[in-house]
Image (spheres, rainbow, N blue to C red):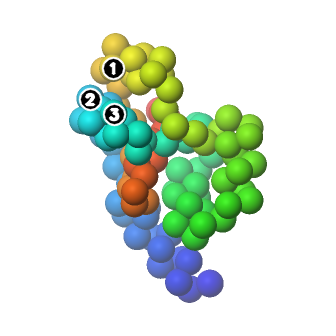
Amino acid sequence: MEQEDLLRAKLNGETSRMPWKELLRFFAGGTVIAVSPELDLVDVALRIANDDAQTIAQWMAGNQVGKVSDAQASAWLEADATLWAVVVKPWILVQEKD
């Protein structure tokens, strides 16, 4: 369990706010994953890093985790949005949260 705590702390430390326009090239490459505001971004990142396929599949089925849609990307661009982001290679997880 200590290893998981270390990974959680590492991911938490690497989480930051980023302007959406700086993430556009990654969106174009298909590597940006949107995380619903009701989920904990670091917890989602940890589960992806640990390959927790069952939980991730449940979140995807509930539309809580998934690739950013063109419509969402356009809305964020138009709003000049800044999102929370964390990298879990090869993915960049983003979350819209106040």
Residue in the image at 35% along x and 60% along y: 14
The secondary element bearing badge 1 is classed as helix
Residue at mark 1 to residue at mark 3: CA–CA distance: 13 Å
Q: Amino acid at mark 2?
A: Lys
Mark 1 or 3 closer to N-term?
3
Q: Amino acid at mark 1?
A: Leu
68 and 17: which one is in front?
68
Residue 85: % across, % down: 39, 46
Left of 82 or right of it: where is 3? right
Residue in the image at 58% along x and 55% along y: 44
Above or below, 85 against 44 in this view is above
Mark 2 or 3 closer to N-term?
2
Query: Residue tagged by mark 3?
Result: 28
Residue in the image at 58% along x and 70% along y: 50
Say if residue 71 shows up in the picture. yes
Query: Residue tagged by mark 1?
Result: 77
Question: Quadrant location of residue 37?
Answer: top right
Residue at mark 1 to residue at mark 2: CA–CA distance: 6 Å
Task: Rate crowding at label 2 as few (under 14), some (14 to 19) or many (20 or more) other CA atoms within 10 Å.
Answer: some
47 and 28: which one is in front?
28
95 and 98: which one is in front?
95
Residue in the image at 68% along x and 35% along y: 63
The secondary element bearing badge 3 is classed as helix
Query: Residue tagged by mark 2?
Result: 21
